[in-house]
Image: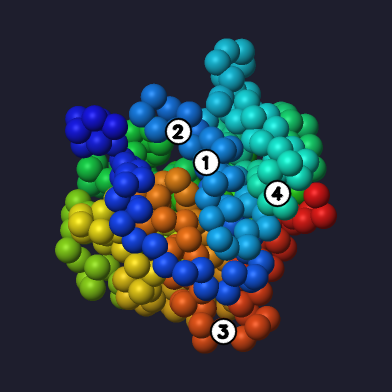
Amino acid sequence: MSTTQQAASPYLPVREDWLDTHHEAILEPDLPIVDPHHHLWDRPTWRYMPDDLFADVKSGHNVIATVYVQARAFHRAGGDEDLRPVGETEFVNGTAALGASGVYGPHLVCAGIVGHANLRLGGGVERVLHAHIRAGGDRFRGIRHIVAWDSDDSLLNPGNPAPSGLLADAKFREGFAKLAPNGLSFDAWLYHPQIDEVTDLARAFPGTSIILNHVGGPLGIGRFAGKHAEVFPGWAASIKKLAACPNVSVKLGGIGMRINGFGFEHAPKAPSSDQLVAAWKPYIDTCITAFGAERCMFESNFPVDKGSYSYPVFWNACKKLAAGASASEKDALFRGTASRVYRLNLEG
């Protein structure tokens, strides 16, 4: 990326030379991992394609499978506008076939697929859901309709505009109501001031599985810059309230983004796993205590978080964060919860 493009991007640039400034031995290399949140794309300034994904999952940890989550990538260029996001599912299902072939190793990449459908279509979204299910074969598992919004415009991603209060919108909920009858879950990506809106949604639709992305998006830039200590109590209270909804699970990760404001990217060397643990432990511990290991899953959010640390260092940090867990809890955090929530077929 050029300097101008970096300044305009909502994402941190990936600097391979910077990531190479820190390496460490792989911890617990045999522990099976399902990475339940990553993306693929080929953009003018940023490429993360199947070869890049395979390079990361082969970098030392025992990543047996992954779940792909929508990223506005490879939409159809023409035709019915509502159906254009189905192109992403078509592409990802092909990538999943590469993994299932065994040619690239025993990694079932994209074993689950989460796509996008405009839930504001109301009941009309059902034809889009059916198209995704057909395109994804037996791998399509859910929908993500990003609702991240804040009154501070500097926090908004121009590629994913959303109005305030979308989760309560009547038309949105009409579309949301079509998910469970079609066997689909909902991935919720928003910012920490919106977590209570997810709680309201979960209470209204107790039969729909909802997965909170990125520990609920704690913000640390813009109007929240330098305010991690001030933000944490309100975030934690909302997390505990949401955890009372048994249909909700949470992804532990996705907090290496620019918006989280931890500033790893400003250091002369890429961070160690110990540095990540020091920054994240209060958030991870709060989520695990509130939800229980059986409703928590560690996630990489790559390549978005790759601007802050490498894939091997990230998973080392997760293993250190889970050091006090029992064997069954650890299995849930790294494999079991993701496999169950996304109903993965790990037999290939």
SS at badge 4: loop
| Residue position marked by numbered label 2 in the rendering | 47
Looking at the image, tell me whether mark 1 or mark 3 is earlier in sequence order.
1
Q: Are marks 1 and 2 in contact (CB under 8 Å)?
A: yes
User: At label 2, which amino acid type do we have?
Assistant: Arg
Q: Which residue is mark 3?
A: 325
Q: Amino acid at mark 4?
A: Gly
**Dot 1 corresponds to which residue?**
52
Amino acid type, label 1: Asp
Q: Quadrant of the N terminus?
A: top left
Name the residue located 72 percent from the left edge and 52 percent from the top edge. 106
**Could you tell me if the residues under marks 4 and 3 are in contact, i.e. CB atoms within 8 Å?**
no
The mark that comes first in sequence, 4 or 1, is 1
How far across and how far down the image is residue 312, in percent?
A: 48, 61
Q: Say whether disc 1 or disc 2 marks the residue closer to the N-terminus.
A: 2
Q: Secondary structure at mark 1?
A: helix
Residue drawn at (43%, 27%) of the image: 43
Nearest the eye: 85 or 98 = 98
Q: Nearer the viewer, mark 2 or mark 3?
A: 2
Q: Is residue 322 above or below residue 161?
A: below
Q: CA distance from mark 2 to mark 3?
A: 36 Å
Residue 105 is labelled as: 4
Tell me the CA gap for discs 4 and 3.
Answer: 29 Å
Q: Amino acid at mark 3?
A: Ala
**Foreground of the two, 193 or 56:** 56
Q: Earlier in the sequence, mark 2 or mark 3?
A: 2
Describe the element under mark 3 as helix, strand or loop.
loop
Distance from label 2 to label 4 (Cα)? Answer: 22 Å
- Locate residue 323 relative to residue 210 in the image: left or right: left
